[in-house]
Image (cartoon, rainbow, N blue to C red):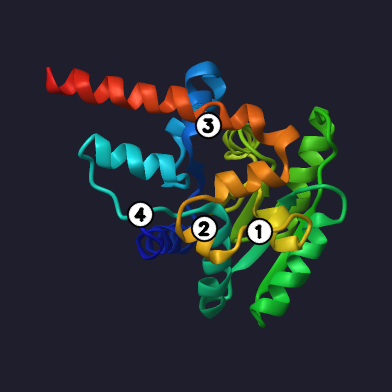
Amino acid sequence: MDHETAFARISEWIRRHQRHYVAVANPHSVLLCRRDPDMGLAIRQAGLVLPDGVGITLAARMLGLPHRGRVTGPMFMLNACDWGRQFGHRHFFYGGRPGVADRLAGRLVQAFPGLQVAGTYCPPFRDMSDREQEDTASRMNASRPDVVWVGLGAPKQEKWMLHNASRIDVPVMVGVGAAFDFHSGNVRWAPAMIRHLGLEWAFRLLAEPKRLWRRNLDNFPFLMAVLKQRFRGQM
Protein backbone atom coordinates (compact mmCIF):
# COMPACT_ATOMS: atom_id res chain seq x y z
CA MET A 1 0.00 0.00 0.00
CA ASP A 2 1.35 3.43 -0.96
CA HIS A 3 -0.03 6.97 -0.73
CA GLU A 4 -1.62 6.94 -4.19
CA THR A 5 -3.39 3.62 -3.61
CA ALA A 6 -4.62 4.77 -0.21
CA PHE A 7 -5.89 8.05 -1.67
CA ALA A 8 -7.78 6.17 -4.38
CA ARG A 9 -9.44 3.96 -1.75
CA ILE A 10 -10.40 6.94 0.40
CA SER A 11 -11.70 8.87 -2.60
CA GLU A 12 -14.02 5.97 -3.41
CA TRP A 13 -15.31 5.85 0.17
CA ILE A 14 -16.04 9.57 0.11
CA ARG A 15 -17.69 9.39 -3.31
CA ARG A 16 -19.98 6.58 -2.18
CA HIS A 17 -20.31 8.02 1.35
CA GLN A 18 -19.31 4.71 2.89
CA ARG A 19 -18.09 4.59 6.48
CA HIS A 20 -14.58 3.28 7.08
CA TYR A 21 -11.59 4.09 9.21
CA VAL A 22 -7.85 3.90 8.65
CA ALA A 23 -5.30 2.68 11.19
CA VAL A 24 -1.52 2.99 11.05
CA ALA A 25 0.56 0.08 12.35
CA ASN A 26 3.96 -0.09 14.00
CA PRO A 27 5.52 -2.87 16.13
CA HIS A 28 4.03 -1.42 19.32
CA SER A 29 0.49 -1.40 17.94
CA VAL A 30 0.89 -4.94 16.54
CA LEU A 31 1.85 -6.25 19.98
CA LEU A 32 -1.00 -4.29 21.53
CA CYS A 33 -3.33 -6.37 19.36
CA ARG A 34 -2.06 -9.47 21.14
CA ARG A 35 -2.51 -8.00 24.61
CA ASP A 36 -5.74 -6.06 24.14
CA PRO A 37 -8.70 -7.82 22.47
CA ASP A 38 -10.43 -4.50 21.73
CA MET A 39 -7.33 -3.21 19.98
CA GLY A 40 -7.10 -6.42 17.96
CA LEU A 41 -10.75 -6.08 16.94
CA ALA A 42 -10.24 -2.43 16.01
CA ILE A 43 -7.37 -3.28 13.67
CA ARG A 44 -9.25 -6.20 12.08
CA GLN A 45 -12.30 -3.99 11.47
CA ALA A 46 -10.30 -1.16 9.87
CA GLY A 47 -10.99 -0.50 6.21
CA LEU A 48 -7.29 0.11 5.69
CA VAL A 49 -4.16 -0.48 7.77
CA LEU A 50 -1.06 1.46 6.74
CA PRO A 51 2.55 0.35 7.49
CA ASP A 52 3.72 3.22 9.70
CA GLY A 53 6.75 1.79 11.47
CA VAL A 54 10.02 0.79 9.83
CA GLY A 55 9.74 -2.44 11.80
CA ILE A 56 6.64 -3.36 9.81
CA THR A 57 8.36 -3.06 6.42
CA LEU A 58 11.42 -4.87 7.81
CA ALA A 59 9.16 -7.69 8.98
CA ALA A 60 7.53 -7.86 5.54
CA ARG A 61 10.94 -8.27 3.90
CA MET A 62 11.98 -10.94 6.39
CA LEU A 63 8.77 -12.88 5.78
CA GLY A 64 8.90 -12.46 2.00
CA LEU A 65 5.70 -10.43 1.89
CA PRO A 66 5.14 -7.73 -0.77
CA HIS A 67 5.11 -4.11 0.33
CA ARG A 68 5.62 -0.63 -1.09
CA GLY A 69 7.39 1.00 1.81
CA ARG A 70 6.14 2.99 4.76
CA VAL A 71 3.10 5.26 4.90
CA THR A 72 3.56 7.15 8.15
CA GLY A 73 0.65 8.87 9.87
CA PRO A 74 2.21 12.37 9.96
CA MET A 75 3.22 12.33 6.28
CA PHE A 76 -0.07 10.76 5.23
CA MET A 77 -1.97 13.59 6.92
CA LEU A 78 0.01 16.25 5.06
CA ASN A 79 -0.32 14.54 1.69
CA ALA A 80 -4.03 13.82 2.16
CA CYS A 81 -4.79 17.44 3.11
CA ASP A 82 -2.92 18.63 0.03
CA TRP A 83 -4.50 16.04 -2.28
CA GLY A 84 -8.04 16.59 -0.98
CA ARG A 85 -8.10 20.29 -1.87
CA GLN A 86 -8.92 19.52 -5.50
CA PHE A 87 -12.08 17.73 -4.36
CA GLY A 88 -13.09 20.21 -1.66
CA HIS A 89 -12.79 17.64 1.12
CA ARG A 90 -13.82 18.89 4.54
CA HIS A 91 -11.55 17.96 7.48
CA PHE A 92 -12.33 17.65 11.17
CA PHE A 93 -9.46 17.43 13.70
CA TYR A 94 -10.22 15.49 16.90
CA GLY A 95 -7.59 15.05 19.59
CA GLY A 96 -4.56 16.59 21.23
CA ARG A 97 -4.15 18.70 24.32
CA PRO A 98 -6.21 21.89 24.71
CA GLY A 99 -5.54 24.22 21.80
CA VAL A 100 -3.51 21.72 19.76
CA ALA A 101 -6.26 20.88 17.26
CA ASP A 102 -6.89 24.59 16.59
CA ARG A 103 -3.18 25.29 16.06
CA LEU A 104 -2.93 22.22 13.83
CA ALA A 105 -5.83 23.36 11.66
CA GLY A 106 -4.42 26.88 11.41
CA ARG A 107 -0.99 25.67 10.31
CA LEU A 108 -2.45 23.29 7.74
CA VAL A 109 -4.58 26.03 6.24
CA GLN A 110 -1.44 28.15 5.91
CA ALA A 111 0.46 25.29 4.32
CA PHE A 112 -2.38 24.32 1.99
CA PRO A 113 -4.44 27.39 0.99
CA GLY A 114 -8.03 26.47 0.29
CA LEU A 115 -8.04 23.58 2.76
CA GLN A 116 -11.56 23.27 4.19
CA VAL A 117 -11.72 22.80 7.96
CA ALA A 118 -15.07 21.50 9.16
CA GLY A 119 -14.16 21.76 12.84
CA THR A 120 -11.81 20.91 15.71
CA TYR A 121 -12.22 19.41 19.15
CA CYS A 122 -9.80 18.47 21.94
CA PRO A 123 -11.52 15.88 24.15
CA PRO A 124 -10.88 15.75 27.92
CA PHE A 125 -8.12 13.47 29.24
CA ARG A 126 -10.56 11.14 30.96
CA ASP A 127 -13.31 8.72 30.03
CA MET A 128 -16.19 10.63 28.49
CA SER A 129 -19.76 9.98 29.60
CA ASP A 130 -22.29 8.59 27.14
CA ARG A 131 -23.90 12.03 26.96
CA GLU A 132 -20.58 13.68 26.16
CA GLN A 133 -19.87 11.13 23.44
CA GLU A 134 -23.30 11.66 21.92
CA ASP A 135 -22.81 15.43 21.98
CA THR A 136 -19.42 15.07 20.30
CA ALA A 137 -20.86 12.83 17.61
CA SER A 138 -23.70 15.32 17.01
CA ARG A 139 -21.19 18.16 16.73
CA MET A 140 -19.15 16.26 14.17
CA ASN A 141 -22.19 15.21 12.17
CA ALA A 142 -23.46 18.79 12.05
CA SER A 143 -20.13 19.95 10.57
CA ARG A 144 -20.49 17.50 7.62
CA PRO A 145 -16.84 16.37 7.40
CA ASP A 146 -15.44 14.06 4.74
CA VAL A 147 -12.45 13.08 6.89
CA VAL A 148 -12.05 13.04 10.67
CA TRP A 149 -8.41 13.00 11.80
CA VAL A 150 -8.05 11.34 15.21
CA GLY A 151 -4.99 12.12 17.33
CA LEU A 152 -5.44 10.20 20.57
CA GLY A 153 -2.51 7.78 20.39
CA ALA A 154 -2.64 3.99 20.31
CA PRO A 155 -4.67 2.10 21.39
CA LYS A 156 -7.13 4.84 22.38
CA GLN A 157 -7.63 6.23 18.87
CA GLU A 158 -8.20 2.81 17.29
CA LYS A 159 -10.77 1.89 19.93
CA TRP A 160 -12.44 5.28 19.55
CA MET A 161 -12.80 4.82 15.79
CA LEU A 162 -14.13 1.28 16.25
CA HIS A 163 -16.78 2.39 18.75
CA ASN A 164 -17.78 5.51 16.81
CA ALA A 165 -17.75 4.14 13.26
CA SER A 166 -21.52 3.73 13.26
CA ARG A 167 -22.25 6.84 15.33
CA ILE A 168 -20.41 9.47 13.31
CA ASP A 169 -21.68 10.07 9.78
CA VAL A 170 -18.34 10.50 8.04
CA PRO A 171 -16.84 8.49 5.17
CA VAL A 172 -13.30 8.36 6.57
CA MET A 173 -11.67 8.48 9.99
CA VAL A 174 -7.88 8.26 10.24
CA GLY A 175 -5.90 7.63 13.42
CA VAL A 176 -2.62 9.53 13.19
CA GLY A 177 -1.41 9.80 16.79
CA ALA A 178 1.58 12.11 17.16
CA ALA A 179 0.87 13.92 13.88
CA PHE A 180 -1.24 16.41 15.87
CA ASP A 181 1.72 17.37 18.03
CA PHE A 182 4.19 17.45 15.14
CA HIS A 183 2.15 19.55 12.73
CA SER A 184 0.83 21.93 15.39
CA GLY A 185 4.40 22.69 16.48
CA ASN A 186 3.75 21.26 19.94
CA VAL A 187 6.52 18.66 19.53
CA ARG A 188 9.48 18.80 17.17
CA TRP A 189 9.15 16.45 14.19
CA ALA A 190 12.27 14.49 13.26
CA PRO A 191 14.30 16.05 10.42
CA ALA A 192 13.60 14.67 6.94
CA MET A 193 16.88 12.75 6.73
CA ILE A 194 16.22 10.95 10.01
CA ARG A 195 12.70 10.09 8.83
CA HIS A 196 14.09 8.82 5.51
CA LEU A 197 16.50 6.53 7.36
CA GLY A 198 13.66 5.13 9.46
CA LEU A 199 15.13 6.44 12.72
CA GLU A 200 12.19 8.54 13.91
CA TRP A 201 11.71 6.17 16.83
CA ALA A 202 15.25 6.94 18.09
CA PHE A 203 14.77 10.69 17.63
CA ARG A 204 11.49 10.64 19.53
CA LEU A 205 12.91 8.43 22.28
CA LEU A 206 15.76 10.87 22.86
CA ALA A 207 13.31 13.78 22.90
CA GLU A 208 10.73 12.15 25.21
CA PRO A 209 12.45 9.23 27.03
CA LYS A 210 10.13 9.15 30.06
CA ARG A 211 7.01 8.84 27.92
CA LEU A 212 8.27 6.54 25.16
CA TRP A 213 10.77 4.12 26.69
CA ARG A 214 8.15 1.48 27.50
CA ARG A 215 6.73 1.60 23.97
CA ASN A 216 10.16 1.09 22.42
CA LEU A 217 10.71 -2.02 24.53
CA ASP A 218 8.24 -3.71 22.18
CA ASN A 219 10.73 -3.60 19.30
CA PHE A 220 12.65 -6.61 20.62
CA PRO A 221 9.71 -9.00 21.26
CA PHE A 222 8.25 -7.94 17.90
CA LEU A 223 11.49 -8.91 16.15
CA MET A 224 11.58 -12.22 18.01
CA ALA A 225 8.01 -12.97 16.96
CA VAL A 226 8.85 -12.20 13.32
CA LEU A 227 11.93 -14.45 13.42
CA LYS A 228 9.89 -17.22 14.99
CA GLN A 229 7.27 -16.94 12.24
CA ARG A 230 9.95 -16.93 9.54
CA PHE A 231 11.75 -20.02 10.80
CA ARG A 232 8.48 -21.82 11.44
CA GLY A 233 7.52 -21.18 7.81
CA GLN A 234 10.81 -22.70 6.62
CA MET A 235 10.34 -25.94 8.55
The image quarter in which residue 167 lies = top right
Pointer 4: residues within 10 angstroms few (<14), some, or many (20+)?
some
Decide: marks 1, 2 in contact (CB < 8 A)?
yes
| SS at circle 2 | helix
Tell me which label, 1 or 2, sits earlier in the chain. Answer: 1
Residue 171's x, y, as percent?
Answer: 53, 54
Of the numbered discs in the image, which one, if any, rests on residue 189? 1
Q: Observer-nearest residue: 215 or 153?
A: 215
Residue 124's x, y, as percent?
Answer: 85, 38
In the rendered structure, which amino acid carries the disc numbered 4? Answer: Gly
In the rendered structure, which amino acid carries the disc numbered 2? Answer: Arg
- Residue under numbered circle 4: 69
In the rendered structure, which amino acid carries the disc numbered 3? Answer: His
Residue 78's x, y, as percent?
Answer: 58, 66
View extreme (bottom): residue: 113
Of the numbered discs in the image, which one, if any, rests on residue 225? none
Q: Evaluate whether residue 172 shows in this view.
A: no
Rounded to the nearest whole Å, what is the CA distance between mark 3 and mark 4? 18 Å
In the rendered structure, which amino acid carries the disc numbered 1? Answer: Trp
Q: Observer-nearest residue: 1 or 86?
A: 1
In this view, 73 is above or below 161? below
Residue 205's x, y, as percent?
Answer: 65, 41
* Picture residue at 65% right of the left edge, 31% below the top: 213
- Residue under numbered circle 2: 195
Tell me which label, 3 or 4, sits earlier in the chain. Answer: 3
- Residue under numbered circle 3: 28
Q: Evaluate whether residue 105 shows in this view.
A: yes
Tell me which label, 3 or 2, sits earlier in the chain. Answer: 3
